[in-house]
Amino acid sequence: MRQGKVYSRRDFMKRSAGSTFGAAAAASLWGTSSAWAAANDTVRVAVIGINGMGQNHIASYSALKNVQVAALCDVDENLFEGVIKRHFTDKGRPRPKTYTDVRKLLQDKDIDAVSIVTPNHWHSLAAIWAIQAGKHVSVEKPCCHNFFEGQQLVKAAKKYNVIVQDGAEQRSNPCGQSMAEFLHSGKLGEVYLAKGLCYKWRDTIRHTPDEPVPAGVHYDLWLGPASKRPFSRNRFHYNWHWNWEYGNGDMGNQGVHEMDVARWGLGVKLPTRVCAMGGHFMFDDDQNTPNTLMAMFEFGNESGGGDKKKILQFETRHWISNREDAMWIKGSADTRTGYMISADNTVGNLFYGSQGYMAKTVSNWQAYMGSKREPGATGKGEGNHYQNYITAIRQADPKEYNKNIEEGFYSCALIHLGNISYRLGRSLDFDPVAQRFVNDDEANAMLRREYRKPFVVLDEI
């Protein structure tokens, strides 16, 4: 795998010409998508990380026309046969190649694009390596495990001529797009406050002991950039979310979607001030991220009234506190709530403007206008994030399309800044231009991690 090289258009076409993707794919990136019509336009995708959400990716790509999931990569070999049977051989699809080391996968010239569904601490590193290897990249949320990684991922997406998609799926939904148009056009007046809610019913993870690495698990590869430590099941499949070494808590898990929507609708990028508090309540277990967290972000707003600022409020809650009394978000006792409510969870967004407020779910939004909160405009609709990625590979200009990964970084940045404030136990001033905390070496040191060689996100991209 080649790293640190800028590919010219000629380089890219040479690299592409040897694969099924072909020179037509390289041509399409510069606006001649009709070239695909005269060639085998099958896009060969590799899914990296096949536990949990990885299987959603496999199923979603497999359902698309002229797309083949041609390879799977995971550090747990025990997953391969069951996943291959369920998604490939039982459905009459060709058996994919399998890899345990992402570096070897990225050397496979038959692979055109990758979809990264690893634990968070691998997201940016795998994405940057794939970009440098000339692969198109879709990276799950959050696109970075820390602030520095997000900066480096944005640099790589700007430098190399491949498509890079952020995992903020609601950006692909007509619902989200019409929401943003409504808010940004001033139809709710001056939008001064956005709220994101992530109330998920999560039980204790209890304690699990350190133990020998299970057969078939390539644990050193799983750890990757993280520090060396013994294997424990609470630091492996899924429960890694609740450990700072690998995850970012629920604000960086489910919450990243609602954070992105809140920031998008509010029309802001990076804050000038952040304050977060919360804790890991009720349970004595292995979790070290908070299960309850309240974060506030302040942004400048020169065109606004009053104090010339906007506020983004984010709240993560767990367990019995998940169910919120729906009365407080209703226009009247007979108005249906605008939140996404399941049997156990309340997840969604609110926007407050000078002319009304809006409630939003994944697939619907409703505005309530005036002091009487009368129902106003609405929007709805879900898109196909996976299809958007494939369409971008065939048609989009990377320099334009890859602006979405920068938007993804800004939303993830809020998560990281909020978590830093929580972990330090104090409010912080931030310079959005310098992208550093103001006169705070302790906080700035937390913008990146110490990397375990050779799994390093480099300063030079």
Image: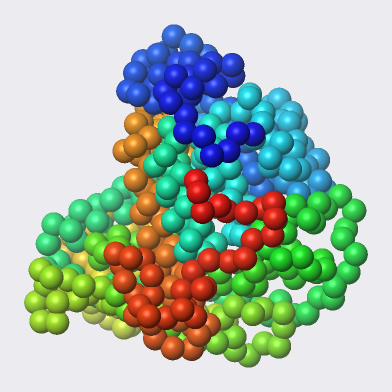
Which image quadrant for residue 184? bottom left
**What residue appears at the point 13 percent right and 57 percent down from the top-left corner?**
185
Q: Decide: is 134 above or below 307.
A: above
**What residue appears at the point 83 percent right and 53 percent down from the top-left corner?**
217
Using residue 246 as the reference point, say whether residue 80 is left or right of it.
right
Seen from the viewer's position, the closer of residues 3 and 136 is 3
Using residue 154 as the reference point, say whether residue 19 is left or right of it.
right
**What residue appears at the point 40 percent right and 13 percent down from the top-left corner?**
35
Is residue 280 something one can see in this rendering? yes
Q: Decide: is 338 above or below 100.
A: below
Seen from the viewer's position, the closer of residues 450 and 374 is 450
Q: Decide: is 259 above or below 295.
A: above
Using residue 386 as the reference point, say whether residue 57 is left or right of it.
right
Q: Looking at the figure, which quarter contains the N terminus?
A: top right
Seen from the viewer's position, the closer of residues 28 and 439 is 439
Residue 264: where, in percent of width, then height? Answer: 30, 60
**What residue appears at the point 51 percent right and 73 percent down from the top-left corner?**
445
Residue 273: where, in percent of width, then height? Answer: 32, 79
Which image quadrant for residue 100? top right
Q: Decide: is 156 above or below 187.
A: above
Seen from the viewer's position, the closer of residues 198 and 399 is 399
Residue 18: where, in percent of width, then height? Answer: 59, 16
Which image quadrant for residue 61? top right
Residue 459: where, in percent of width, then height? Answer: 51, 54
Question: Residue most toward the top?
Answer: 38
Total count of labels: 0
Is residue 323 something one can see in this rendering? no
Using residue 14 as the reference point, say whether residue 451 is left or right of it.
right
